[in-house]
Amino acid sequence: MDKLILIDGNSIANRAFYALPLLNNSKGMHTNAVYGVTTMLLRLIEEEKPTHFLVAFDAGKITFRHKDYKEYKGGRAKTPPELSEQFPLMKELLQAFKIDQFELEGYEADDIIGTVSKLAEENNKQVLIVTGDKDLLQLASSNVTIALTRKGISEVDRFDPEKIKEKYNLIPNQIIDMKGLMGDASDNIPGVPGVGEKTALKLLHQYGSVEEVLAHSDELKGKMKEKIQTNADQATMSKELATIFREVPVKKSLEQLKFDGFDQKAVSEMFEKLEFKSLLEKMDGSVQLDNEVVQEEINVKVVEHNNLAEVLDKLPSMKSIHFEIIGDNPHQAEILGLSLFTDEESYYIPFDILKSDEARGLREWLADEKQEKWMYDYHKTKVALYWQDIELHGVTFDIYLTAYLLDPTETKNHTISGLAQRYGLSGLKNDENFYGKGAKFKVPEMDSLSEFLCRKVSLIHKLTPLIEANLEENELVDLFYKIELPVAQVLAGMEIQGVKIDINGLKLHGEEIQLKLDDIMKTIYELAGTEFNINSPKQLGEVLFDKLQLPVIKKTKTGYSTDAEVLEKLANEHEVVSKILEYRQLAKLQSTYIEGLLKEVHQDTQKVHTYFRQTIAATGRLSSQFPNLQNIPIRLEEGRKIRKVFVPSSENSYILGADYSQIELRILAHISDDEKLIEAFQNNMDIHTKTAMDVFGVSKDEVDAEKRRTAKAVNFGIVYGISDYGLSQNLNITRKQAKQFIDQYKSVYSGVDQFMDNIKKQAKQNGYVTTLLHRRRYLPEINSRNFNLRSFAERTALNTPIQGSNADIIKLAMIQIEERIQAESLKSKMLLQVHDELVFEVPEDELDIMKQIVPEIMESVIDLKIPLKVDVSYGRNWFEAK
DNA sequence: CGGCTCACG
DNA sequence: ACGTACGTGAGCCGC
């Protein structure tokens, strides 16, 4: 069946404008609303596959409705110029999309949509109306669905008559009656004063329509009766105003609205003009490249045994290399092959050729430190190559790592094709498009594969100087060469080293937990009086809140919330609740940390080899995958025991941990230059106790556990970019109390207060914030008019310099410690980094030196206004190292 | 594949 | 009036 999409252009543009940050392109054009509309169009085209399409706009200020009620839409804030200037762009864009648009003096978009949808219905077409305006719900029918945007524009709720029935218990037409009674402030439709949605629905459920309500107004009581009767005319008029006029003289046939795909080239050009870089890329991926897209000539040679000598000859003149790695986990990834680039031609060397005896010279070249190499994702490649016994040295540039430094929040488009696009070197398909995704993944034939991979390496070659220039401009050169690139190498070493697991111990622990789980499960079923899947929040919610009738504390968008916070509050209401908490705790240990960890133990090494991702976290932190070894339990004793299975890889060795004490607050003291905070750290005071003394105005002896706990939460809050609401939630106190704590904190630590102000100003001015070592994070939403987006950006502006500087510092320490280990030929190995802590395995006879070296380096890598402090501990396993 | 929950810093 | 603490990854459920 044909499908017609009707878009309420003004409504969607408005939504997009207020939902998205006010994007500015290089020419100073505002493009956020156009951007929002564009993403919506693309999504609709892809997901709905419409056969017909129309976007309707309002035209003129005066509509027929003003004849009846001249205050219609009065009192509305004027459309800001930043939005109105975007309408011409939007219309131009629609032309490129070959989507019809229509507006008519005296009518609103609503009326046009009403008219066209009626026409379409009569011709047995399916209709989807996209709008942010609830009024349109009145048009719903068996063939007409309304997609109502919610929370910005990225999500929509679909309404058909059944859904409307479900939500309001009304038929679509009664939406008009609802508006008639409750009015609509945004359109200045008065309705009946004092009647809101609740009352309107109640009346309609009883009487059915405005007319019937008015006819039976005698039956109403008290205030309500009075309100309805005195405003009877107003209600009738409001209903009329809200009624969509479905007889607009739209001189368009359905045939004219036909949509059969957009003009690829025109749309690309439009995106170019608007500087929609990410969309340009997406376009590139969504369409097969054809003759329209100019691809550079490229001379590709597939290397076989017979022409290997030619490659070996040319090696000295080569710099750019690319290993194509399939799979996310470099410890078990497949390497397809290597491509190499010279100015005249590119070579693709399949992996089995690279591994052959004849290619030894090539492997030596790869391992030669003196042979400079440029590439994409050195870290992952180095690890993947290790498992194939191939060494890689001499890498001096990595376009992946540098792209991350240039914009650490962007993660998807740090691909080669994405970067090429951004730097105006189009012509490469993205991986998903080339290989297919999911089950459709397939490595194409050699011809096309070799060309694709040679294009990649040629782009690496062209991108390197461009990106390097960019690094320079952004003062990121040192961060890259002195920290990120060396740390990539350190990380690869740690991951390859791996952490030995006591598999037996882990299995035994698992069996123990299983016994407890079985037991608790039985108890839960008995107490609940029913058997259900405790792991299903949905089923659990039904048991707790429907069957057992416990009070609902919190809801999620899909139903009842059953998280730990809620369950703790319900613990006194029913015995089963604490059992569920216990079950959850153990189930988490079992599935994630026992079974999950066992799955990741490497067969040959009996170790877990995590992969630290260096280009994910927006703050510069690392993240850890396959398995994540940065979130092994420690807070609760039961979970902490898991750490017993993390053991040294050789006899007579120890696990040694070294962690920075209060590093984030120390960094805050340094960058805020707060006198009191600096003094506290110089005197090596317990910082939370000190904060308690200052916030509560008491002496040290008067700080009890409760006061210290509160002060600790305040300190955390400060680091996160505090809000009274957040603190109140965390401490389970009122917002007012939370605000008092914060105000008190700010008055005592005035330097911190000033810092918080300054950093926000700085962010607003520059559009980004930086860390101690110049790491940069852009905060485009810092100037948004959307309160939520702006507030979030402000908190990020506070937190990123702190969290990010911490990341800088520990990375520096890792590099220096590794250098020292090498220099002194120690056998100790760095195993893990957990944000503010490093974990090593240390032979017994190196304990003394490592206990000295590690904290010494960690404390001295950077000179701050306050000392850094490191605590060291060690034991026979990770648990004992506490 | 998104939502919920929960582990860590 | 708005509705939030900052940064991650993994397992499970249910569509």
Image: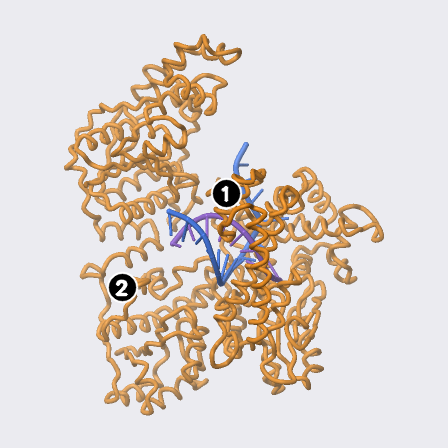
Chain colours: A orange, B purple, C blue
User: What's the chain of the residue with tag 2?
Assistant: A
Q: Amino acid at mark 2?
A: Gly
Residue A600 screen position, x and y as percent = 48, 71
Residue A477 screen position, x and y as percent = 50, 68
- Which quarter of the figure is the N terminus of chain A placed in? top left
Distance of mark 1 from mark 2, alpha carbons? 54 Å
Labels in figure, total: 2
Q: Nearer the viewer, mark 1 or mark 2?
A: 1
Nearest the camera: A229 or A255? A229
A259 sits left or right of A236 in the view: left
The disc, 1 or 2, on the residue closer to the chain's N-terminal end is 2
User: Mark 1 sits on what residue?
Assistant: A542
Q: Is residue A486 visible?
A: no
At mark 2, the secondary structure is loop
Residue A379 screen position, x and y as percent = 46, 73
Where on the picture, by quarter, is residue A435? bottom left
At mark 1, the secondary structure is helix
Rendered view: A837 above or below A389: above
Nearest the camera: A643 or A187? A643
Q: Residue at x 61, y 79 (%)?
A: A648
Rendered view: A37 above or below A468: above
User: Mark 2 sits on what residue?
Assistant: A427
Task: Classify 10 Å Cα crowding around label 1: few (below 14), some (14-19), many (20 and above).
Answer: some
Q: Amino acid at mark 1?
A: Glu
